[in-house]
Every structure is written in structure tokens, then in C-alpha cells.
Image: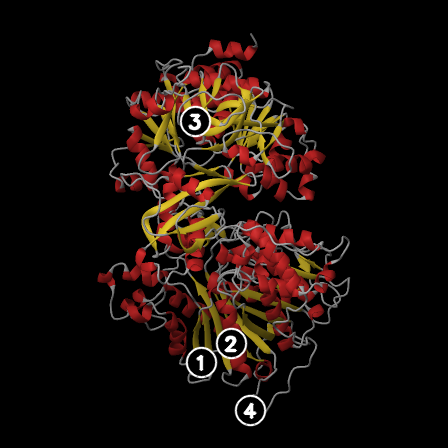
Amino acid sequence: MNDLMQVRHQVGTLVDLLRMRAQESPDTVAYTFIESESARSQVTYGELDRRCRAIGAELQREGLGGERALLIFPQGLDFIYAFFGCLYGGVVPVPAYPPRKRRFDRLAAIITDADAKVVFTIAELRDDLNAALGESKLAATRVLLTDGEREAGLEASWRRPVIHGNSLAFLQYTSGSTGSPKGVMVSHGNLLFNLQAVKDTFSYQAGGASVTWLPSFHDMGLIDGVLSPLYVGQHGVIMAPTTFVQRPFLWLWAITEFGGTNSGGPNFAYELCAQKIRPEEKARLDLKSWHTAYCGAEPINQGTMERFVEAFGECGFSPEALSPCYGMAETTLIVSGERRGGSRYLQLSRDALKANRAEFVDDPDAYSVVSCGAPVIETTVRIADADTRRSCKPGEVGEIWVAGPGVAGGYWDKDALNVEIFGAYTSDTREGPFLRTGDLGFLWEDKLYVVSRVKDLIIIRGQNHHPHDIEMTAAEAHPALQPTCGAAFSIVDDGEEKLVIAHEVRREALASLDIEQVVKTVRQAVNEGHGVIPHEVVLLRPASLPKTSSGKIQRQATKGHYLAQTLSLAAAGRKTAQPRPDLAEPPSANQDAAAVARFSAEQIERELRAVLASALSIGPEAIDCAEPWSSYGLDSLKGSAAVAALGDRLQTALSPTLFYDYPTLTALSRHLAGRNIAIPRAAPSAPAAAASSETPGAGEEIAVVGMACRFPGAESPAAFWDMLTAGRDGIAEIPATRWDVGQFYDPRPGTQGKMVSRRGGFLPDVSQFDADFFGIPPIEAEAMDPQQRLLLMVAADALENASIAPQSLAGSQTGVFVGICNLDYIRLCLADLDTVNTYSGTGGSQAIAANRLSYFFDLCGPSLAVDTACSSSLVAAHLACQSLRLGESNLAIVGGVNLILTPELNVVFSQAGMLAADGRCKTFDAAADGYGRGEGCGVVVLKRLSDARRDGDRVLATLLGSAVNQDGRSNGLTAPNGPAQQAVVRRALGDAGVAPAEVGYVEAHGTGTPLGDPIEFNALRAVLNEARPEDRQCWVGSVKTNIGHLESASGIAGLIKTVLSVQKGVIPPHLNLQKKNPYLECQDDRLDIPTRCQPWPDGYDRRIAGVSSFGFGGTNAHVLVGGVRS
């Protein structure tokens, strides 16, 4: 008997196991949780035991022994403390899927089903859970914290609970509808047996390291990722699933960093690594320690395994490490698994499979099935006919039945279901009881092969989807569909599980049915709601969906009709995937990018249509060349992959940002064929037009004669410059005076009603305002949006900075141009109608923000509030320059303001995936994950340069030219567009009479998004590197890394920074840049990003810089700023 078998017999429960480890190795690190390459936390066996005894003692003192406790945690050590703490207290833990976009209903159903008296969580989730429990009439359920204060020495009062091997250890709730959750009852004995089976099958060794990113609330993540290291005596290394999905490299990096010996995941994880990890990242990997790479939880694809081996063989990964396996929550975890070096693939006849026979063929187009190995120790697997329950012979396909010590005790409080699922006997041999898995497979040479499933659960990319949830989303997507008359099911296509939806059409909608539009709407709704794109949507005639006599949808029967093509279609309701048409021969190798243009647009369009059809699994004829990619539910992953596939066919490297730059098939085809000349280039070196007598400032430079600001961490331009050059930022915790952060914060992306970040760039004391100074009655001042108050104060400061007496402007042709788009304050006021008064209308109006300045200073020029979202204040500067050059204004006050007073937009932007969790813009960095919101106000005072010199004004810098455009019908309303960005920069250069090579710095829009950043950088590079000498440097940075994204005030913030930079001849450092985004085209260093203060680069006759600002609706602005000539 080996040491681990002795462990299994020496300890009867997980409590005994952890106590043994703590006593034998108290200072050994048990678990390490990694958030990034540099951020990690860990706990030793001794400290873990102490924490768990304290939690257990608290539960015992509260008399909760024998009860159930729901565990709701983000991935991390707190979950481990709660899980073992419950076991120590004799309480049954119930790990739960943290709610994201779905409602609290599912968790409430689990609490009710398990009769849970306690919910364990962390402090930052407590208020949200208490509120949700109250709304769900579960207010009696107590919320306890793992990170809460406990009295010192509480662990000393702990007593071992009366538990043994047959005692219930935890409930594992399987994916299902919100109405009928099923909790699998897993005992301590089940767990200890399964842990030994895993160790024995995969040859885990003490002293190794287990690495997992799988969620701890899932059976594989919990048992193999958390419990197995404890059982074997290994170091458990854990990361969050989102960390892996966002950057797959970190999984393999962790294996390298910690010498990982065993790790794994579903098939999609290996595919993602093979596709996404770049060569320079591979150079950092050493996978020779990886002894066992298990793969399970979804259908396993031979091609994926082969691609992974090919991709990472150079990193030391051995193909012998691949270990496909099979299991489920109902068997605790594992049923069968391949031992190291035993992987095997069989090619099966598809026709024979339809007859439930495994017939081996030598055909590359055959159905490939991967061996999941032999059943683990002490486990019996039988294949039985699902209908007759007769035993199947080797090679016959039937339902997989399992018996052994790993089979759980059934579903909690589901006696009738347990008899059906856990109590099956073969009809011919009366052998049993067996667990009916609902999966189809066969045994061959004592190894298990899984070919499909008969149960309804849909598993795609390792994620479980209940058909009922998808059916509800589909039914609500379009009014032409009949409610409760749809069926969602999965099919296997090319070795991959895919989603099909069949849905009845309302009888009254048949006559005017727009099939294309209905299908497109359903696909998009399901993709947005569930993160999976339907392979096919089939529209059925009314009353034709297979149902039972009681009206229950028969999904498997519907699937059978679908495969047999015997469904009753509504007209041409079936959108069937068609074989790809014959394609043109791909070009020969060694062609450069210019060679693409030699193909006609029609040829490239045909190639691209086929690539896109393959990516979407639809027929090429179903693709409308004029429709944006987004209308097909094409996500960035598949869009980038489609562009890459096209590049492969054309034998040239294509940037993945083309997916955004050219949002339709026709636009991209024409671009690649060399026809994409949508906007004529302005001649950058052309001289400015001569001024006419009627336009006194036409073509004249515009002088900046004064400015003021209040930005996060800086109350004046001087303080702002100090912060910029010192490389500091103004990002901090959301002030408690704004709202209760804890009520709205949840770190899990997509959680309904929550925001993912607690931080941003905020101003202090935004309620302070000297109403008497501005002659405003207190009652009116209170009704004024604080943005209006802030604008008044900063505008007065700017005039003072310009040495202009406000009273001297009375009655003058002074224009006011203000960028503003936030409506938080009026929403706050209208929430309580008792506070509304006669001043509320003007106090909450955006237009009045500009008009109030004109009114207070008695200004008679144009007075405009500009809302183009994020580009508002730079568009305002452009309009001011035009007004001055046209003679419409003789002086202009230009500003932008933004205040964040309510949490709603934070929640909205979090739901859209736009916000960075740490509140910081990581512009141009590989780790960019969204922007951090910021607030502030900036104002500049502008004059025609000749007027400023005449009046003896101090000139800080001049605005040489500007341009504004729109990106038209791009790849979605809010998608960035590279060609449009290039066009606006070229137009501004033309307006300024400046050549691209004369620009030494660009203040980028740079919000910090993975694809938006390279689109902008690469657009700048395409323009500014034209005719640029090799030794002439141009720097690119973004003030958003210092103060966050000020939204409507972001353009003015960038302009003020650039004026200071041009004035002082210094370029401040760009923050938060650790590693450049891999999609930045940095083939040379003429365009680069400053990470420390830089003097203005050499080789320029004059300091000239550009400022970009792009609205998320597509309105782009660019302004050229020049240093003052002697």
C-alpha cells in the first residue's frame, strides 16, 4: 500500500486531512492565488487550519451544525477559507455560481432548495446580497463574512464535528433552469476515493505543483484545483477564470513560474492557447515540468490536441502529457482518464453512428473520437440501450452507466428523480444500481469513448447552458415568435458542439415574415445574453414543434427531426449551413502586402465571403456584403480570426484591426483591392488660403492667451504640469459623498446592476460654490447642475489667467463653446419631485451651461453647448477656431466639464465591458482592459493671433488648424474606425498647412481598450510616418493615464496638457505602460511612447503637436498646436 493509499485509510474526512497537513507541515505554503505576473497572495497549511478553526468555532457557537451554507465568492483564497471553515463547523458548504448578467433568481432557488440558513461571502458583496435576499423574501438567511472581524483566539474553542466518511461533505448544484436546481450530494468518502482515483490515474506526485484557472465553485476546479493538492501534498496555484480568458498566456506562464506538474481544462482552453499565445510570449515559457495535461468537461477535439502539441512543443510540452478524461458532478468528478502517453483517436463512420454502431474507417472526413481512457479504480462502466436498458456489446453505442465509490448519493431532496437517475439496472443481466449519465458512448479495448449526449444540457466551450434560458431569450428577441414554443439543443459539427434553435412563428406573422431579419435578431440576442452564437436558427410553422401531451417541449425529438430535415418550416425558414463554394486558388507564397491589391475586389470578396461563412457556420449566400459584421453576431474573437484566415489565403499578414476599420465585406474587399479612396487626402504642405477682407482671421493661427483647470489631483495648470512631469496620477477611491460604493460594486464583470471598479479620477468638494460672487440667489444655485457652477468658476479663473477683466467683455462678440454631456444631476433632482422648483429647468439644462457664461459675463457672440460624447470639448475648440477665423467672434471661451454624481453610468459601462477594474487607463499596454472614469473642468481663452499681438497678450501657444469628421456606417455605432481617424488627422494637417513629418508629439485619445488603442496608434503611424526622416522622433501619449477619461472634458484636458508641453518644450511620461499592446505597429521607433520625461525631439524648426479626441458615436476631432514663434 503506497503512502497516499495509507492517507486515504488513515483519514476519514477532509477535516482530518487538512488537520494532518497542518500538524505535519504548518509552514508549508498550501495555496497561492495569482492575479497577474506580479500580484499574488498565499496561505500556509498552519494559517489555513487556524482560519478554518475560527470559522468553524463561530458556526458551532451559532448552533449551525448540520445546516447548509451557500458560498458566493470571486475566485480566491476566501472561498477556500469558507469551504473548509464550513467543514470544520459541521456545516455543509454549497458552492454557487456567482451571478453575472443573470438575475438573483437562480441563487434564490438554490437557497430555497438547499434550505440554506447561511450565505458566506466577503465584505464588499455583503450589502448587495442582503438587499437581494430581502427582495427574494429570504431576509431570514444570514450573511457571514470570511474577511470579517473575529475575536482573538476564537479558534481555540473549536471542537471536531461528529462527521465520518459517509457524512455529506458538500452539495454541488448542477447547471439547470432557475425553477428546479439539483444539488448533487457528495460525501467525504466520495471525495477521498475520487482524489485517490485522480492521483492514481494521472500519477500525481507529492511535492509537485497543481495549477488551475477553473472556477472553484465548479466540480473540476474545486476537486482537482483545490482538494487534490491538499490530498497529494502539492502546492496549489490558482487564478481566476477571467484572468485566463483575457490573457491565456498567464495559465502557461504560471505552469512555468511554479514548475506546474499537473493542470488542465476543457477543450476550448487548449484551442484558445494555440490561437492566442504569441511567439514572443512562447519564448518565455518552459513547460517541461508539465507531466499531466488533462482535458475534459466538454467534447474533446483531436485537431485541438494536435494544434496544441504543435504550438507548444518548442516550449518543452510533451504530447505524452495529454490526458483526455471523462466525468461529472454526479460521479464526484472523474469516471475515466487516459494515463500519460496513452492518448488514442479513432475514426468512425458517420452512417454507422446513426445506427448506434462504432465502425472504424480510414477516412480523414470521418467522425473523430478521442479515447477518455479506462475507468478509474473500483469503478464499473456499462453501456446500455437508453430505451430498453439492455447491455451493449463492445463497439455498440449506448448510454454510459457508472457504478463505484465515486458515484454521489443522489440529488438533494429529489427521491423520485434519484430512483430514475441513480438506481438503474440492466434489463438483461439485472446488474446495478448504476448512475445514468445521459451521455452516449461505447467501450473499445476497455477504454471509454464519448460520442454525444441524450440529455438536454448544452455544453459549449466548457460552459453549461440550459436550453430553457436560451429559449426564453430567443422568444423575447422578436415579436414574430410564439412564446414558449421554441427548442434549443446542441449538435456536433466538425468535432465541435454547436447550438441550434428551432422556434415557431406566430400565425398572424406568417404573411409578412421577414426571415432574414428575425434570424439575425435572434442570433444577436442569444449571443449578447449567453455568449454563444447559434449555429442555426430554424423558423417553424405554428403548432408544429414536437411536444408531449401535457405540452412539454420535446427537445431531443426536435433535434431528431432537425437532423432528418423533417421539421415543418415556415416558408423558407431554415437557414442551413451550406458547403463552401469552390474558391479561387490562393496566391503563391512570398507575396508582400502590396500583392493583395492585384486581386480584384470581386475575387477578394469571394474569398472573404467563404472565410466568413466558415467562421459563422452559415451558407455564403446568406451573407449580405453591405451588412456590418456586428449584424451577424460576429464577436471580436471570431472577427479577428476571420481576418487572419483571409490573410492566410492571400499569403499576407493582415492586422486584426481591419475587422473594425472596414466594417463590411464590401468595404474590406475594396480596401484590399486598392480601391478604398473614400476621402481625398488634403495636401499637407499646401499654403493656407489668403485671408479675404470679409473674413479677418481666415487661415490665421489662433492664440491661446489664458487657461485654467480643475482636474483630479490638480487645481491649476501649474499643479497639473507638476503632476504630469512627476509621473503621478489622480486616481483614487470613489468619494463616499457621491454614493455608497459597496452597494453598487461587484468585481465580477457583467454582474447585473453592479459596477466593476471602485476607483476613478474625482474632484474634491464639488458642492462648494460662491453664489454671492456670481450674483446667484441660493435657491437658484442649489438647483444648478454642479457642472454649471464649476464652469463659471473655472471660466473666471481662465480670464484672470489671460489678464482680461470680465467687465471689459460686456456686450462684445465673445463666443462660448462648451463640451458637456453628463445628466447625472437632473436625474438626481427628478427622482424627488418635491425638490423641483422654478429654477430646475435651467439648472439642469446642458444648453444653459454655455448660455449662463454668456449671461453672466454679458457676451453677445455664439453660445453653444456641444455634445459629441467623448470628443465634445475638442469639437468645441474646433468650432471656436472657425468662429474666430470667420469673424463671427473676436474672443472665444472654450471649455469642457464632467462630473460623476450617480452610479448609473458606471453600471451601464460596466455591463458593456468598457470600464477597467482598477480605474486606470492602461493606454497602449497589453493589459489594457477598459477605461477609468474621471471628472474635471478645463477652459481656454482664444484670440486671433494678430489681435493678441495687437493687444499685448501673453501667447501660450497657437492652434494651427483643426478638423472634425464622422466615421459613417462603421462596424457598429460605437466601434472605432482607423481610416476615419486617419482622415481627420490629414484634414487637420491640411487646414494647418503642416506636413506630417513636422509633428513631434501627439496627444492621443487613448482610452485603454485592447483593440481601440492599436487602431488609433496604427492610424497615426500611417499618417505621421509619411516622408518622415529616419532620425526624426515623434512621441505619442495620453493624459488619460494620469487623470482618467474625463469624457466630455477629455479633449480640453488633452489640449491643455499639449499647450503646456509645447510651451515648455518637455513631453511628460505616459503612465501604466508595462508591455506594449502586441497589435501596435511598432516596426520602427520613429513613433514611440514616452515612459519618462523627454525633451522636445531634435530636428524640428518649430514645436508642433496634434491632439485627438474621438466620440464613441463616431465624431472625431483633431487639433494642431504650435509653439510661439520668436
Label 2 or label 1, whichever comes before in sequence order: 1
Quadrant of image for the C terminus: bottom right
Instruction: Mark 3: give few (<14), some (14-19) or many (20+) Cα within 10 Å.
Output: some
Identify residue type, mark 2: Leu
Mark 2, secondary structure of its residue:
helix
Pointer 2 with pointer 1, Cβ within 8 A = yes
Q: Which residue is mark 3?
A: 437
Q: Earlier in the sequence, mark 1 or mark 4?
A: 4
**Which residue corresponds to mark 1?**
862
Regarding mark 1 in the picture, which secondary structure is present there? loop
> Mark 4 highlights which residue?
694
Residue at coordinates 61% horizontally, 70% vertically from top-left?
Answer: 983
Mark 1: few/some/many CA within 10 Å (<14, 14-19, 20+): some
- Is label 3 in contact with label 1 (beta carbons under 8 Å)? no
Residue 788 is situated, as x and y percent measured from the top left of the image, at 38, 68
Q: Nearer the viewer, residue 116 or 370?
A: 370
Residue at x 60%, y 48% (from the top left corner):
926
Residue under numbered circle 2: 879
The image position of residue 789, as x and y in percent, is: 38, 67
Tags 3 and 4 touching, CB below 8 Å: no
Q: Please, what is the three-letter code of the amino acid marked with disc 1?
A: Pro
